[in-house]
Amino acid sequence: MKKLSLFILGAVCSLQLVAQEFNSAIDYNDYIVEQQNKVGEAILTFNDVMASDDATKESIQPYHELLISTCREGLGNLHELSDYEGNDELRQAAIDLFNFYVLTFTDDYTEMIEILFGENSDEETMDNLNALLEKITIGEGEFDNGFAMAQASFSELYGFDLLENELQEEIDEE
């Protein structure tokens, strides 16, 4: 009986691990963009809470945790994604970007929150905050540019045009 139960459990688990199927390169691209958009929405929410007049370290903590978990979930989804017709460049660039997100939101944002809500607000503290923000901006630019190039190459290879992402425009405006 125990062997039968383990077999059934294994069969159910393997059905859940079936790779995502896509009808077109556009669908494949859109799935990856969907993962990015989830992170983008979490960033916007986090930024809104941070910008509120009554923001505290405690009040933003759930939004910070949501941001990290959203990134980790997206990264997991990308790792489960297979290549598209042997092409893995777009997927790998997205994984690299999401690895950057996870690291940044886990480490750098935690440090930023400590600085912003810490006891000290002297010139050295502000210099540290500015250096951290510059580090994040430079890193994001590199990974975002790598993803954009991979996405442009993918769309050219499979013959479709990329559209502007309105959510990305909203994030860039902040």
Image (cartoon, rainbow, N blue to C red):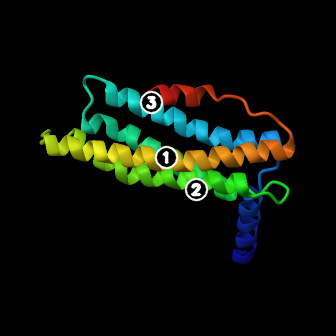
Which comes before the other along the chain, label 2 or label 3? 3
Q: For mark 3, give the secondary structure.
A: helix
Q: Residue at x 21, y 39 (%)?
A: 117
Q: Nearer the viewer, mark 1 or mark 2?
A: 1
Q: Which residue is mark 1?
A: 140
Mark 1 vs 2, N-terminal side:
2
Check residue 11 in the rendering and tell me which mark sits there, or answer none. Answer: none
Report, in whole angstroms, how far the alpha carbon at label 1 lies from the one at label 2: 11 Å
- Which quarter shows the N terminus? bottom right
The Cα–Cα distance between marks 1 and 3, rounded to whole angstroms, is: 19 Å
- Three-letter code, disc 2: Asp
In this view, 90 is above or below 40: below
Q: Residue at x 79, y 33 (%)?
A: 161
Nearer to us: label 1 or label 3: 1
Disc 1 marks a residue whose amino acid type is: Glu
To which residue does mark 3 refer? Answer: 45
| Horizontal and vertical percent position of residue 113 | 28, 43
Q: Earlier in the sequence, mark 1 or mark 3?
A: 3
Q: Is residue 73 visible?
A: no
In this rendering, the answer to whether 51 lies above or below 112 is above
Q: Which residue is mark 2?
A: 96
Q: Residues within 10 Å of mark 1 (few under 14, many from 20)?
A: some
Instruction: Indicate the quadrant containing the C terminus: top left, top right, bottom left or bottom right.
Output: top left
| Number of residues whose C-alpha sits closer than 10 Å to that of mark 3, classed few (under 14), some (14–19) or many (20 or more) | some
Identity of the residue furthest to the bottom in this view:
3
Q: Do the residues bearing badges 2 and 3 touch, measured as CB atoms within 8 Å? A: no
